Image (tube, rainbow, N blue to C red):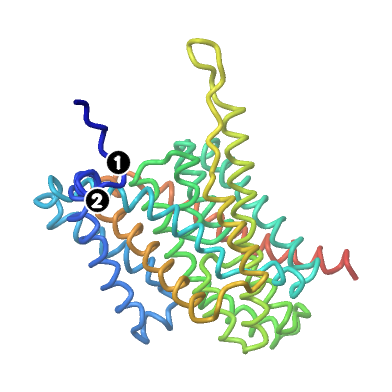
C-alpha cells in the first residue's frame, strides 16, 4: 500500500524547513529590536541616524566579535534575512508613499528628482569604473545609495547588481557619512545664501533642493526642519517622489546589465534579473494611494516594514568583516565625496535650471 508524499505545508516539512533558520532569525531580530530602541534616543534622532543605520553598525559589531562562534547554527537564518526579509521590506516600503505625493511637488519636483537620480548614478558609474578603477558592482551600489534613498536603495539594488556583502556595507557607510554631513551643511548653506543675498531661495525651494539631493529620508527630515516646517514638508514629499523612482530604476538597471553582459560559452546573453519586488513596491504604493487599509493596520504594517528592513540590515552587518572594509580602501570614500559634491552643486544648478524653464 503506497503512501502519498507529505504536503509542503505539513508540520514535519515546515519544521524541517524552518528549524535551521530560527537561530539566525532570532539573532537578527534581537539586533533589530535593540537598534529600533536605540534609534529613539534624542541624540541619534537629532543626527538623522535611522534604525537601519544603527542595525548595520550593531550587526558589524556582533559579526566581528561573537558571530564566528554562532555561525554554524545561525548562517541559514541570517542568509534568509538578507534575502527574503529584505525583499519583503522593500515591497512594504510602498506603504510610506502615495501617488498623490507627485501632485504635491508638481512638475518641478518630479523633473528635479529624475535629473538628479539619472545624473548621479551615471556619474557614479563613470567615475567609479573609469577614474578610480573600482569594481562595477561597488560603484553602482554607491551610486544607487547617493542617487535615490540611501541604505534602502543600496539594499534594493544588491540583488540586481549582485554585489558582495562588503561592497553593500561600504556603500551604506558612505550614505551615513555624507548624509550626516548634509544635515548640517544644507541649513548652514541656506542661511549663508539668505544673509548675503547670493541666491533667491525661499523655504519651499529649499525643501525641493533638500528632498532631491540628501541621501536618507531621516536626514531629509532633519535638514528640512532646521529651516522650518514648510521646508520640511516640501522636502519630505520631494524625497518620497524620489523614492518612487526606485522601482523603474531597478527595472532599467536590470535590462542595462543584461544587455551589457558578456555572452555565455553557448552564445546566449546573460538572463535579465527581474526585480519582482520592485513591482510589488509599486503595487503597494498604488494600494496605499487608494487608502484601502484601516489606519491602525497601515501603521502596524509600516512598523513591521521597519522591523524587516532592520533585520535585513543587521544580517548584512553580521556577515561583513572589518578586514573587507579595510581592503576597500579610500576609493569608495572619494567616489562618494565627489557624488556628494555633485548633489550639492550640481543639484543646485539642476534646480535653478528647472525653475527657470518652468517659469
Instruction: Say how many tags the image has.
Output: 2
Is residue 43 toward the left or the right of residue 282 in the image? Answer: left
The quarter in which the C terminus is drawn is: bottom right
Residue furthest to the left: 69
Q: Work out whether 216 lies above or below 316.
A: below
Question: Whole-percent x and y of residue 349?
Answer: 74, 63
Q: Work out whether 110 lies above or below 201.
A: above
The image quadrant of residue 221 is bottom right
Is residue 142 toward the left or the right of residue 164 in the image? Answer: right
Question: Whole-percent x and y of residue 143?
Answer: 54, 50
Front-lying residue, 223 or 185: 223
Q: Is residue 220 visible?
A: yes
Q: Is residue 239 visible?
A: no
Mark 2 secondary-structure assignment: helix
**Residue at left offset 79%, top offset 70%:** 106
Front-lying residue, 16 or 333: 16
| Distance between the alpha carbons at the discs numbered 2 and 1 | 23 Å
The quarter in which the N terminus is drawn is: top left
Q: Which residue is mark 2?
A: 77
Is residue 261 toward the left or the right of residue 82 in the image? Answer: right
Question: Whole-percent x and y of residue 3?
Answer: 22, 31
Q: Residues within 10 Å of mark 2 (few under 14, many from 20)?
A: many
Mark 1 secondary-structure assignment: loop
**Residue at left offset 42%, top offset 79%:** 47
Residue furthest to the front: 1
Amino acid at each position: 500500500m503506497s503512501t502519498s508524499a507529505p504536503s509542503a505545508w505539513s508540520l514535519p516539512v515546515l519544521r524541517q524547513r524552518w528549524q535551521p533558520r530560527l537561530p539566525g532569525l532570532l539573532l537578527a531580530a534581537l539586533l533589530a529590536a535593540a537598534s529600533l530602541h536605540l534609534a529613539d534616543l534624542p541624540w541619534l534622532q537629532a543626527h538623522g541616524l535611522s534604525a537601519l543605520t544603527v542595525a548595520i553598525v550593531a550587526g558589524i559589531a556582533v559579526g566581528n566579535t561573537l558571530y564566528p562562534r554562532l555561525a554554524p547554527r545561525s548562517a541559514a537564518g541570517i542568509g534568509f534575512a538578507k534575502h527574503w526579509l529584505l525583499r519583503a521590506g522593500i515591497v512594504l516600503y510602498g506603504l510610506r508613499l502615495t501617488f498623490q505625493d507627485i501632485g504635491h511637488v508638481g512638475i518641478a519636483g518630479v523633473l528635479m528628482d529624475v535629473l538628479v537620480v539619472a545624473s548621479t548614478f551615471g556619474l557614479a558609474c563613470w567615475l567609479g569604473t573609469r577614474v578610480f578603477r573600482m569594481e562595477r558592482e561597488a560603484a553602482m551600489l554607491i551610486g544607487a545609495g547617493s542617487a535615490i534613498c540611501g541604505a534602502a536603495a543600496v539594499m534594493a539594488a544588491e540583488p540586481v547588481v549582485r554585489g558582495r556583502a562588503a561592497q553593500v556595507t561600504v556603500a551604506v557607510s558612505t550614505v551615513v557619512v555624507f548624509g550626516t554631513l548634509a544635515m548640517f551643511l544644507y541649513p548652514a548653506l541656506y542661511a549663508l545664501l539668505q544673509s548675503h543675498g547670493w541666491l533667491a531661495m525661499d523655504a519651499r525651494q529649499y525643501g525641493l533642493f533638500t528632498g532631491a539631493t540628501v541621501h536618507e529620508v531621516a536626514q531629509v527630515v532633519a535638514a528640512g526642519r532646521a529651516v522650518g516646517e514648510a521646508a520640511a514638508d516640501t522636502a519630505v514629499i520631494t524625497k518620497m517622489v524620489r523614492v518612487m523612482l526606485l522601482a523603474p530604476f531597478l527595472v532599467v538597471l536590470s535590462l542595462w546589465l543584461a544587455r551589457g553582459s558578456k555572452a555565455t560559452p553557448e552564445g546566449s546573453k546573460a538572463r535579465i534579473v527581474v526585480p519582482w519586488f520592485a513591482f510589488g513596491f509599486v503595487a503597494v504604493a498604488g494600494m496605499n494611494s487608494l487608502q484601502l487599509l484601516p489606519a491602525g493596520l497601515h501603521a502596524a504594517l509600516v512598523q513591521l516594514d521597519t522591523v524587516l528592513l532592520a533585520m535585513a540590515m543587521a544580517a548584512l552587518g553580521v556577515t561583513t568583516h572589518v578586514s573587507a572594509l579595510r581592503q576597500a580602501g579610500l576609493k569608495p570614500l572619494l567616489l562618494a565625496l565627489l557624488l556628494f559634491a555633485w548633489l550639492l552643486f550640481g543639484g543646485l544648478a539642476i534646480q535653478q535650471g528647472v525653475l527657470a524653464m518652468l517659469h
